[in-house]
Amino acid sequence: MTRLNKMRAAIISQGSKSSAWTAEAMKKYFKTVDLVNIKDIEVSLGGEGEVLYKGEPLPEYDCIYAKGSFRYANLLQSITSLLYKNSYMPNQPRTFTIAHNKLLTHIELQRNKIPTPKTYISPTLESARIILKKINYPIVMKFPAGTQGKGVMFADSYASASSLLDALGALKQPFIIQEYIESGNIDIRAFVIGGKVVASMMRKAQPAELRANIHAGGEGKTCELDRQAKKIAIDTARAIGAEICGVDMLEGPKGPLVLEANISPGLQGITAATKIDIATKIAKFLADKTKEFTTLKKKVGAEKILTEKIGKAESKEIITTLDFRGERVLLPEIVSKILQFNERDNYTIKIEKGKLIIQEFK
């Protein structure tokens, strides 16, 4: 625990209750944990770039857990792109653009052969009307950006869908058309951390409400996912580059279908439904991964310094043990890097008592 207590962490977010819970849990594993409000962050691009917090350079952290709504997707990608190499982060920079856009999410899921409801996009209102005439009803129409069930509309006929289309056209907003899956107004939220489903709940919409989101009044209760559903949730998180992620699914006729992935998932609803301390699971995961990250960073840094030092010296002498593999001896990795051996070249090996000389054959 001593080494862990030297690590410094920050949560960059909009200051939600879920972030506060996670920060409190992280204090068991990190020396300091700062809550950084994303509204106070600026990014200076040009040269090496810089992330500023309240006008000052953001302090260095071993771990940064960045999250926020779709409104901050570009800022989150900019922040993480600049800091990704020096701090452990559970979500890749590209993840913020993908996960905060339902269209890009569906494209990634399609590429990774993850099952979703049939989804259509259209460049014009005229082509959208052609789609509306061909598909079965009811349907769902969505804005690419939006969370907590906001921006999701339902149409049970061509007439109602056409009216929605006129409204969307007036707003000049891009939109997605998707088949409606009858599930009894029930969906499933799987919470994925580090390639594992750590909790899952079933959410049921309120009467006269089709959205099962907790923020839309849905009620959650714990449920156990089968192997297929867990695999789909884990594959979804992996496809968008997220190690902490909520995955929403419906039970379709042929199995689970992914609706969307949420990289800023709330903890209140699923914690209450499952009685699982997810904040602590996140904190422990971040601590373990940060320890691995900092250890690797120190090792790579030490190897770089040693390589540069030896490379400048006229005589190169390394004291090391040998790695025996049966009757073979493997050269230390640093020796291979310095000599830049290539398996396509030929070498002469001169053997003397207690001495081995390897030279490139020219």
Image (tube, helix red, strand yellow):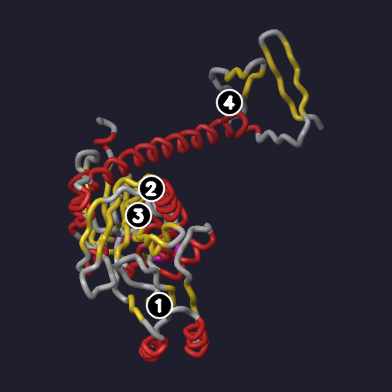
Judge whether residue 235 can be spotted in this image.
yes
Comes first in the chain, label 4 or label 2: 2
Mark 3 surroundings: few (<14), some (14-19) or many (≥20) residues within 10 A: many
Give whichever of 10, 256 is nearer the camera.
Answer: 256
SS type, badge 1: strand
Mark 3: amino acid: Cys
Amino acid at pointer 2: Asp
Q: CA distance from mark 4 to mark 2?
A: 46 Å
Left or right of 162 on screen, residue 347: right
Q: Quick one: label 1 or label 4, which is nearer the N terminus?
A: 1
CA separation in Å, label 3 and label 2: 18 Å
Residue indicated by mark 3: 245
Residue located 41% across and 69% down the image: 102
Magenta stretch bounds: 45-52
Residue 297's place in the image compared with 123, above or below, is above
Q: Which residue is mark 4?
A: 332
Q: CA distance from mark 1 to mark 4?
A: 62 Å
Q: Residue at x 24, y 73 (%)?
A: 209
